[in-house]
Image (cartoon, helix red, strand yellow):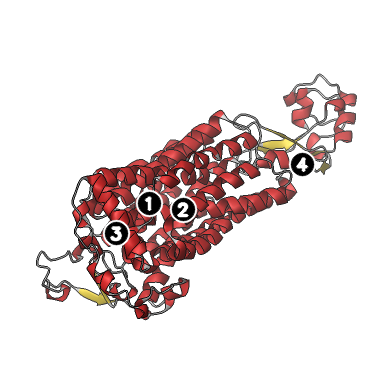
């Protein structure tokens, strides 16, 4: 396993085999990207007010006046209360039913309107249909006293992702990348269809949990599978640009679909279609040969690589993995690894704990931005389309940085840019929403570019024997962060810009933690836990070591730079 990439170098990096795998694996990311915004559009909460029954015999002006005005901030009609309907009807009968709204609000005799007693929405709610015909919130009335069910539904979706990461990571390292990838895609299609027929909130929440299990699990596995099949510059291109491009394009397509299909049940059914379309790809996508070798199944890996050589019109060597063939003794039987191996030695434990915290912070920032978009003005479909579209230049920038810049330096530059933009939002007056939106998009750009680097960085840090478990464990902590993000908007109760400050501060925390990680730029992927780079010392990111052209020289013999001891204790 030490010379895997050298052993398969005869295939080249961009032949017909690599191009086919590149494109097919990118297609398998579409179902995951197409479903991620379901938590936004299915659970959208449009403006609403108490319903006034038609038999109340009130004019439109009296109906509008029967909803109290809340003067906190901008004057708005109450969403959860109305004046007692009997009192409003009596007052209407006394003073006349043909009064205008201004006349009704300025009444002082026999009683001022605001002096009437208020009551809850006994007859249900009337929802705005400007953007949504129906959502889970409007159909199941998850507002007012049941408003707590909205973020809880999102929480269950992300908790499903957490469980999916925990289970799929270990399954992919034990049973293979390919079956877990298509199992996750199958989960997405089955439960996206089932969600469309949910009759009640408890059933919806349970099905939404299962939907979340498949969403992130399938993306993580396809990322790992592509990173192991492809080598060299093609792997960087795949992980930093190709796969994210297809993923982001599918999220943008979701916003367009939600605009065209305003009924949440129909939208959920449509979200199942990309997964169904990916079923034929099972017969076109191979298992990871790198994983097969790590499991002691060298013959299967060689058969797969010889087939790839035939497709690329190159001649494979007589023996592709000589060291693997020489180590087939029973004592060398492939070991089984679990998530506990990520904490077994001091070195991998420190790296793992730092990665977990970085992924958690990045996820809170990413999804906190998404949920806070609802507080911005304009069409939610356009806002989320722009929020997704800004990811495309972010990933292009990530790819360009991945070709020439160290991983730590890239992550720090992008994340600091995003954090500064978000922290500046509080200085923008409310009268300038366009500038606020610009800063939000710039913050999203920085956070997304940093997250793109971190995906690649984590994959390069993790050994092959436990790479999918490591990636999935990070994604699991990412889902812990995303589970908290629906509640981030509630912080605005204390200070309007507090959610943005929290998001920006967490991004800065990620930067500090990244300083302690070893550099992986232009280094071969580690295959075993023992090959993992140590983290006792690190260089400042702008003085990161690049691999010496003389392979015989060790890293210690290279030009030294100011070093400090990492004193972060986790």
- The residue sitting at the top extreme is 98
Q: Can residue 550 be seen in this view?
A: yes
Q: Nearer the viewer, residue 17 or 497?
A: 17
Instruction: Give me the residue at 32% from left, 62% from top.
Output: 299
Q: Quadrant of residue 44?
A: top right
Q: Could you tell me which secondary element the residue under label 4 belongs to? A: loop
* Earlier residue among tags 4 and 2: 4
- Residue position for label 2: 181
Return the x and y of residue 114 as percentages of the image width and height: 78, 38
Q: Is mark 2 on a helix, strand or loop?
A: helix
Label 4 – label 2 distance at C-alpha: 49 Å
Say which label, 1 or 3, has the lower sequence index: 1
What residue would you read off at disc 1? 286
The local secondary structure at tag 3 comes to helix
Residue displayed at 31% across by 62% down? 460
Q: Residue 243, position in %: x, y?
A: 36, 46
Instruction: Determine the image quadrant of residue 20.
Output: top left
Mark toward the start of the polypeptide (4 vs 3): 4
CA gap, disc 2 to disc 1? Answer: 11 Å
Residue identified by numbered label 4: 81
Q: Distance between the residues labelled 4 and 1?
A: 59 Å
Q: In which quarter of the image is the N terminus?
A: bottom left
Q: How crowded is the residue under tag 4: few (<14 C-alpha within 10 Å), some, or many (20+)?
A: many
Calculate the distance from the C-alpha at mark 4 to the C-alpha at mark 3: 70 Å
The answer to whether the residue labelled 4 contacts the one labelled 1, judged by CB atoms less than 8 Å apart, is no
Find disc 3 in the rendering and name its residue: 302
276 vs 226, left or right, is right
Please report whichever mark, 2 or 1, sits nearer to the chain's N-terminal start.
2
- 435 sits to left or right of 38: left
């Amino acid at each position: 396993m030490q010379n895997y990439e050298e052993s398969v170098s005869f295939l080249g990096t961009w032949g017909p085999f690599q191009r086919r795998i590149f494109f097919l694996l990118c297609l398998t990311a579409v179902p995951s990207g197409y479903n991620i915004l379901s938590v936004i559009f299915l659970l959208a909460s449009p403006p609403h007010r108490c319903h006034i029954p038609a038999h109340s015999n009130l004019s439109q002006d009296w109906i509008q006046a029967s909803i109290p005005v809340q003067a906190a901030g901008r004057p708005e009609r109450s969403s959860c209360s109305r004046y007692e309907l009997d009192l409003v009807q009596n007052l209407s009968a006394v003073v006349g039913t043909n009064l205008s709204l201004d006349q009704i609000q300025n009444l002082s005799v026999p009683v001022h309107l605001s002096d009437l007693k208020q009551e809850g929405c006994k007859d249900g709610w009337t929802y705005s249909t400007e953007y949504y015909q129906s959502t889970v919130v409007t159909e199941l009335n998850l507002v007012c006293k049941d408003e707590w069910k909205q973020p809880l539904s999102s929480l269950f979706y992300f908790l499903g992702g957490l469980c999916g990461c925990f289970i799929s990571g270990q399954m992919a390292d034990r049973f293979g990348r390919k079956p877990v990838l298509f199992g996750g895609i199958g989960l997405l299609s089955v439960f996206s269809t089932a969600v469309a027929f949910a009759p009640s909130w408890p059933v919806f929440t349970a099905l939404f949990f299962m939907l979340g299990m498949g969403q992130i699990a399938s993306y993580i596995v396809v990322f790992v599978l592509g990173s192991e099949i492809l080598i060299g510059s093609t792997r960087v291109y795949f992980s930093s640009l190709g796969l994210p491009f297809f993923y982001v394009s599918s999220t943008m397509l979701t916003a367009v679909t939600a605009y065209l299909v305003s009924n949440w049940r129909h939208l959920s059914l449509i979200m199942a279609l990309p997964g169904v379309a990916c079923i034929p790809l099972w017969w076109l996508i191979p298992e990871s040969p790198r994983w097969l070798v790590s499991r002691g199944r060298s013959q299967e890996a060689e058969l797969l690589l010889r087939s790839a050589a035939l497709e690329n019109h190159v001649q494979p060597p007589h023996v592709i993995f000589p060291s693997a063939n020489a180590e087939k003794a029973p004592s060398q039987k492939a070991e089984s690894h679990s998530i506990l191996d990520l904490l077994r030695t001091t070195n991998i434990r420190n790296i793992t704990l730092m990665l977990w915290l970085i992924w958690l912070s990045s996820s809170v920032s990413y999804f906190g931005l998404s949920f806070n978009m609802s507080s911005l003005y304009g069409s939610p479909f356009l806002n989320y389309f722009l929020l997704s579209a800004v990811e495309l230049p972010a990933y292009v920038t990530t790819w360009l940085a991945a070709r020439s810049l160290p991983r730590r330096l890239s992550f720090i530059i992008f994340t600091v840019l995003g954090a500064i933009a978000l922290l500046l939002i509080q200085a923008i007056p409310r009268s300038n929403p366009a500038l606020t939106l610009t800063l939000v998009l710039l913050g999203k750009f920085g956070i997304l570019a940093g997250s793109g680097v971190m995906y690649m960085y984590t994959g390069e840090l993790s050994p092959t024997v436990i790479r999918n478990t490591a990636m999935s464990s990070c994604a699991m902590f990412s889902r812990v962060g995303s589970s908290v993000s629906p509640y981030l908007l509630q912080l605005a109760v204390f200070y309007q810009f507090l959610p943005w400050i929290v998001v920006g501060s967490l991004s800065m925390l990620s930067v500090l933690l990244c300083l302690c990680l070893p550099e992986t730029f232009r280094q071969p992927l580690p295959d075993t836990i023992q090959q993992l780079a140590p983290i006792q010392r690190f260089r400042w990111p702008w003085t990161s070591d690049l691999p010496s052209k003389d392979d015989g020289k060790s890293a210690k013999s290279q030009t030294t730079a100011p070093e400090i001891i990492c004193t972060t204790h986790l």
